[in-house]
Amino acid sequence: MGRANSEPPHSPTRPQGGAAPNQNNYPLIHNYIRMKLLISWSLALFMLFSAGQSWAQGIKFSEGQWADILAKAKKEKKMIFVDAYAVWCGPCKWMAKNSFPDEAVGELFNAKFINYKFDMEKGEGPEFAKTHKVRAYPTLLFFSAEGELVHKVMGAKDAEALLEDGQAAIDPKKQLYTLQKQYQSKKGLGKGEMKNYLDALMNGGDYAGAQEVAQKQLEEAEEVNWPQEENFSLIEELFADQSSPIYDKVLAKKADFVKALGEEKVNNYLKAGLEAGMRKIAQEQQEKPYLLYKERIKSILGEKEAAASISLLDLQYYFRTPQRDQYLHAYLNEHCENAQMLNSYAWSYFEQKEEEKLLSMAYSWAKKSVALAPGFANTDTEANLAFKLKRYGEAKKAAEKSIALGKENGDDVSETEALLKKIEEKMPKSANGINFTEGSWEEIKALALKENKMIFVDAYAVWCGPCKWLSKKIFTQPQVGQHFDANYISYKFDMEKGEGPAFAEKHGVQAYPTLLFFSADGELLHKTVGAPDAPQLIAESQKALDPNKQLFSLKKRYEKGDRQPEFLRNYIKALDAAYESNVEETRLYLGLIPEAEWKQSEHFEIMMLTEVGFEQKYFDYILAHKEEFVAENGEETVEEYMKGALMSQVHLVGEAQNGKGTKSQEYKQLVKNLNEGLSKDLAAYYTAMLNTIIHNGTKKEFKYLNIMLLEHSDSWQELNEVAWSYFQTEDSKKKLKAALKWINKSIELEENYYNVDTKANLLHKLGKKKEALATAEKAVELAKAQGMEAEETKALIEKIKG
């Protein structure tokens, strides 16, 4: 499948840089020096491109034998440029298609050189390659008019780099072999010339020569000066191998290098050196050196870096064994951040594997690749793997994304379009999401009895934003559709029309969306309130299918006297999901659990569900034993508890002290708890909120509210809600201008339809019609982009214009 230049291939077909194949080459072995100096991994993609050649606006190549070219150069007094290539070499083809036709390249090379394409495997080619030591393709050679080799470059170059190489070839101060002669002379090279020489050696692929020159430079600089940037850059470029004595010297003086260059830079060098040494360990296949190398990695790198390097070592060691799949998955899934590599292996497995487990692994690599850097190729890989795994909904989504990206980049998307057609032919209705049935409630029950299925009801209201989000984003997902179509007759029920109001009253629907699960004969078994994401919705459905977790089955057990802790936990969580009171049940449950066991995750989870767990008795105990709770549940979870508990106390104390000021002992104790239990910024926000509640309804209310919102709030929703409230209730220009500041801060935090609409209304109320109109029109555009209705904002626009 063809791919644009910027896209990675599905799998490389030839060695990097066109070098001769190496039977011991492991795909994941990173010899960073050679990768940097020869050709990067990304150039492997060029191997898939055709060798279409057109030089009408680029380099004009002469034809004939080598002797003819020499004669022509001598006659025209021009240097000679030779593209030493092989017909199978992908990077050679890429240069022919992308670099040689460049107009600027053509201008330089046609003016300064006789240009010649020379196949190294035909006719005079093999002898020429031997004479001039051409060992990898492409190799770019530059000769004087007399036929003397003066400059050499290895690897595929884009147009910009090729221009630089051409300019270097005509400059005696940068020509590789001219510099080499000067270096070997008694006079030697100056500092600037030495840098040019090293660059030319590396660009020409003479790594051993570059190392020899660099080592001499380092010896002259003395070890104490190696941490200097100019010296360390040589070490990074040429001695990133843990077997090098220079590597050991850097390791021994690591603290000095870190002080001068920073820990990240030094650690990256040490890591690269360790990974360069892995190939030998993998080739030897000796357990003792392998285990010792692991310990060496641990002794040099930090925990996270060591884990990644050891995973790479494991992969290389087991690469040609039956355990390869296991170690490849561990490395790619947990440590690899190279989107191209992930895609390459994913496509390879798509082509070669049939086992579902292996294809699922490859699918996870493709998805990770897309998450890192979405492109035409990796989204296409994702689509193909999902199709092969019969995940048609996911395949359709990935294929559509791939086609869109491909068209954007000018790629040939015909094969992906053909795949999409196959996907759509295979897709059951559920692959497009939940298949909702139409009809009356009685007809739905009759159908459920006939098909022996439970009933799922989406109890919604037409104005409800979360209901619309569920319908658009969650109910349409393939995995949701497949699950619900297999288990339920699904029904959308408007609670404010027709049978809706009576239905809502009968089944206790008080908020939207409410999701109801019935038996086939219409008995309500389970209920949850709110807009869950897809995994949460499926998990809630699984509870509805399980008699031990259905809300109303649990209610019956509770009413019959069941008080087992495990049962109570499930019941409390089911009540919470249904937005029903669970205070009595929570007090009962916590009373059964000894204090010393409260820190256990299953009990702490219950504490966090209701205000019961925030009561002083529990809060004081958790604050006193905070480290134990953190060790058991994690710092983030305990922080969430603290926030909830202290917010509850802020409201209780604030309302109790309303109008009484801030001098009470209760106030001072709560502020102390806030500073002990929360981060500095959060404690300041909670304190500001406490002050606002205490002064609510007083002359100082506005002052403290303004401080809380402008100095401490980082919630766009909070700022928007308060600003909207002021728009609705206030006429004071001073307060409306303050509300405008709040809404501007809300928009700075996150611009969306809601807060831009609020701003438009505030501006209109303040008499700023021109600004109000522009802002309202922007709000409508945002609503359209977010798939939302904006009728009220459109009405505001008409009002402003009228």
Image: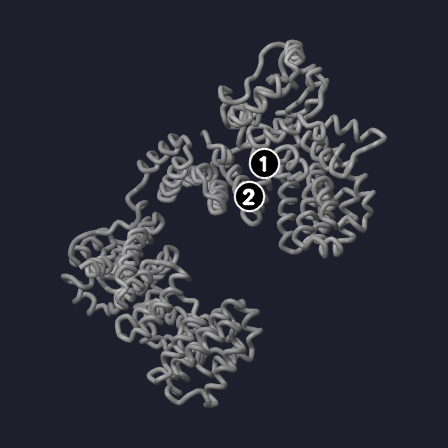
Q: Amino acid at mark 2?
A: Asn
Tell me which numbered mark, 2 or 1, is placed earlier along the sequence: 1
Q: Quadrant of residue 525?
A: bottom left
Which quadrant of the figure contains the N terminus? top left
Q: In x, y percent, where is residue 192?
A: 73, 38
Asked whether the beta carbons under mark 2 and mark 1 sit within 8 Å of each other, the answer is yes
Tell me: residue 49, above or below residue 719: above
Tell me: residue 514, above or below residue 612: above
Any part of residue 484 in sight: no
Which residue is nearer to you in this view: 167 or 358? 167
Badge 2 element: loop
Q: Which residue is mark 2?
A: 338
Q: In x, y percent, where is residue 549?
A: 36, 65
- Picture residue at 61% right of the left edge, 26% below the top: 18
Left/right of residue 578 with respect to residue 13 in the rendered view: left
Q: Amino acid at mark 1?
A: Trp
Left/right of residue 363 with respect to residue 132 in the rendered view: left
Q: In x, y percent, where is residue 19?
A: 64, 27
Any part of residue 781 in sight: yes
Q: Which residue is mark 1?
A: 41
Tell me: residue 93, above or below residue 501: above
Tell me: residue 686, above or below residue 220: below
